[in-house]
Image (cartoon, rainbow, N blue to C red):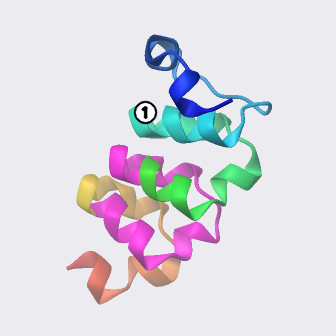
Amino acid sequence: MAAESIPKKQILKSCLIDESSDYDVVRLAVSHQGRSLMNARGEYKNNREIGLIAVNQDGKSLQYVSDELKKDEEIVLDAVKQNGLALQYASEDLKNNHNVVS
């Protein structure tokens, strides 16, 4: 199902995604509510594009991306810029990275 064919009202009303949601639904949902990533399948939590969209919408959605993406400096930087409290969800290495914490 193409993202354009999904009524925005439906997405904005609940921003609910589940294990059966496809890429376009997940992408659209996290663009409106980053934390909706919490209900997505693991493959989407490990998808860099979806992770970037989610953390740019809500930095604290960093807690829902995969451990691998929590090591990605760009994703963590974007999350922390959006919400400084997101740093607590970054990998230990990035929590101590000068580029991230300064």
At which x and y percent is residue 40?
68, 39
Q: Residue furthest bottom?
A: 98
For the point 72% across and 32% down, the residue is 21
At which x and y percent is residue 32?
40, 32
Magenta-colored stretch includes residue 33: no
At which x and y percent is residue 95?
40, 76
For the point 36% across and 59% down, the residue is 79
At which x and y percent is residue 64?
58, 49
On the picture, is 71 further left or further right than 42?
left
Q: Nearer the viewer, residue 90 or 55?
A: 55
Name the residue type under label 1.
Gln
On the picture, is 53 further left or further right than 26?
left
Q: Nearer the viewer, residue 48 or 97?
A: 48
**Within the image, what quadrant is residue 48 found in?**
bottom right
On the picture, is 84 further left or further right than 72?
left
For the point 66% across and 34% down, the residue is 39
Mark 1: secondary structure:
loop
Q: Is the residue 91 above or below the residue 79 in the image? A: below
Give the crowd class for mark 1: few <14, some 14-19, many >=20 residues within 10 Å.
many
Magenta-colored stretch includes residue 60: yes
Q: Which residues are magenta?
A: 55-80
On the picture, is 78 further left or further right than 72?
left
For the point 37% across and 56% down, the residue is 86
Q: Main secondary structure of the magenta part?
A: helix
Q: Is the residue 71 above or below the residue 61 in the image? A: below
Q: How many marks?
A: 1
Q: Is the residue 68 above or below the residue 60 in the image? A: below
Mark 1 highlights which residue? 33
Q: Quadrant of the C terminus?
A: bottom left
Q: Nearer the viewer, residue 9 or 76?
A: 9
**Within the image, what quadrant is residue 22 found in?**
top right
